[in-house]
Amino acid sequence: MSIEEISAEDAAREIEAGGFLLDVRNDDEWEAGRAPGAEYITLQQLPERYSEISTDATIIVVCRAGGRSLKASEFLATQGIVAKNLSGGMQAWAAAGLAVIDSQGATGTVI
C-alpha cells in the first residue's frame, strides 16, 4: 500500500485551501503544541472514531515525526479513506516556521 507523503509547507497550503489536518499524537503532545485548526484523534482511538472524519476535503495526518501518522494513513486507506502523511510530522511543521499553539492558544512546543 502506497501512502502519499506531503511536506509541511505543502500541507499548510492544502489546509489553507480547505484541507483537514488530523493529529494522531498522544494527549501530552497535543496539549503541549499543535497546528491551529487541527482535529485530534489518537492513533489508539482511530479504529473506533474514524467515522468522525469528514471525507469532503483532503485529509492530512500528522504525528510528531511521521511514523504514527503513516500507520494512521494506512489504516484509513483500509477503510477506503484517502489520506496523506505529513512527512516529518509536527517536528517538520515547527521547523518550517508554521504556527504551533498550546491548549490555551499561546505559543506551543512540539514534544
Image (cartoon, grey):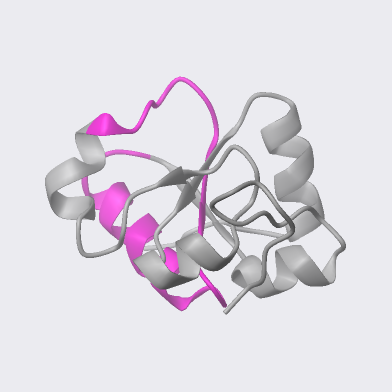
Res 26 quadrant in image: bottom left
Q: Position of residue 106 (x, y in %)?
A: 71, 53
Q: Nearer the viewer, residue 13 or 45?
A: 45
Q: Residue at x 56, y 56 (%)?
A: 4
Q: Residue at x 68, y 63 (%)?
A: 108
Q: Residue at x 78, y 53 (%)?
A: 99
Magenta stretch containing residue 61, yes or no?
A: yes
Q: Is residue 77 left or right of residue 69?
A: left
Q: Position of residue 92 (x, y in %)?
A: 73, 71
Q: Nearer the viewer, residue 8 or 75?
A: 8
Q: Nearer the viewer, residue 92 or 82?
A: 92
Numbered range of the magenta stretch: 52-81
Q: Position of residue 11 (x, y in %)?
A: 70, 48
Eyeballing the image, is 67 above or below 101?
Answer: below
Q: Is residue 26 left or right of residue 106?
A: left
Q: Nearer the viewer, residue 28 or 86?
A: 28
Quadrant where the C terminus is found in the figure: bottom right
Q: Residue furthest right?
A: 97
Q: Is residue 102 left or right of residue 23?
A: right
Q: Residue furthest left?
A: 48
Q: Residue at x 77, y 49 (%)?
A: 10
Q: Is residue 54 left or right of residue 30?
A: left
Magenta stretch containing residue 74, yes or no?
A: yes
Q: How many numbered circles does the render carry?
A: 0
Quadrant where the N terminus is found in the figure: bottom left
Q: Position of residue 88 (x, y in %)?
A: 65, 74
Res 28 quadrant in image: bottom left
